[in-house]
Amino acid sequence: MLAYIARRLLAMIPLLVLVSIITFFIIQLPPGDFFSTLQAQIAETGGGMDTVTMEVLRQQYGLDQPFWIQYFRWISGFPSGDFGYSLDWNSPVWPLVRDRMAYTVLLGFFSLIFMVGISVPFGVYSATHQYSAADHSLSFLSFIGLSLPGFLFALLWMFFGALILRIDVGGVLSAEYRDAPMSWSKLVDYWNHLWPPAIILGLASTAQLHRIMRGSVLDVLGQQYITTARAKGLKERKVINRYAVRVAINPLISVIALEIPKIISESALVGIVMSLPTTGPLFLRSLQSQDMYLAGTFLLFMTLLLMLANLLADILLAWADPRIVYT
């Protein structure tokens, strides 16, 4: 297993290089550059910028160079943690990406815990109580979760929290804790602002995973080895938990890995609605302003997250199903 993990990690390197080339090329496909976009924005406000000044700035930041020179200038700083300079924010890229990625990963982690913690037991219960009133109720709630987008739940929570509960529901912290030193009450307030968006992000995926788990358990319960286990007199709880769920959870683990990019993309709209420092709003602004180093670094880290999630899913599959062996 360790050799397999090492091979997968080494295989990520050329794939990340390929992704970096493709993303850098795609980001530069729109006509113009950051300064032409800035010039257009200034013109909309009635102002103007000298063309000579624009050319001097392009030469200063290397935007007048060919594509491959700009690309190698960008990746040459990777070993030292330098991912370029954000022209829009007038700041190095790494501090901007680090803080946003850390919060988005934390939010996604709690969303995954919520998804698995709800969808697995409810999916097993629906399968073992097929066509009961509880099964129909859970299926109805799942279809609601699948049909409503996350940003709509975010809007509903903002309305309910602000107007009904009279609590501070937007942002990362309440106003009185933003400049306060770290304390237990500040951590509690941070958690109270973290769990609502985590649940909102996980609702649609929870509904999907519940349906997958229900169908998978129903398929496994019809297998002969389940009938044999029951014929040997094993308790029903042991048959379900030890033999049925362990095999039925395979498709769920594979789908969870694909939920990572979905959570990141969904966090963009939820982050805008709830004023959260997720990657989405900053990534969108970097694309609109053609801030190529910032946008390219975001895409690169999202790709890395997807690769690591797939590797983790493969490891979990081997742990859950003894039939899967990696050499």
Image (cartoon, grey):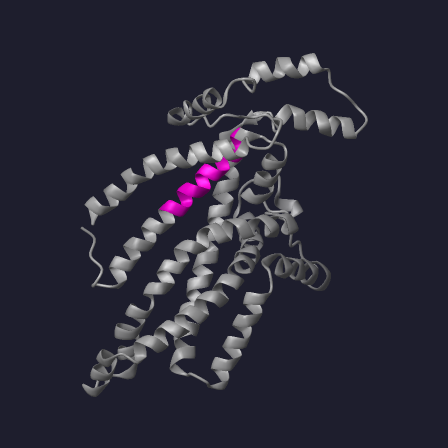
On the image, which quarter does residue 247 sit in? bottom left
Q: Position of residue 89 (x, y in %)?
A: 61, 29
Q: Is residue 215 left or right of residue 37?
A: left
Vertical side of 139 occupied by 131: above or below = below
Q: Residue furthest right?
A: 46
Observer-nearest of 287 and 230: 287
x 26%, y 83%: residue: 235
Vertical side of 74 occupied by 250: above or below = below
Q: Position of residue 84 (x, y in %)?
A: 49, 25
Q: Predominant secondary structure in magenta?
A: helix
x 56%, y 55%: residue: 197
x 63%, y 58%: residue: 154
Vertical side of 293 occupied by 166: above or below = below
Which residues make up the magenta segment? 293-307
x 62%, y 61%: residue: 153
Q: Is residue 255 left or right of residue 2?
A: right
Judge whether residue 294 is colored magenta: yes
Q: Position of residue 4 (x, y in %)?
A: 22, 46
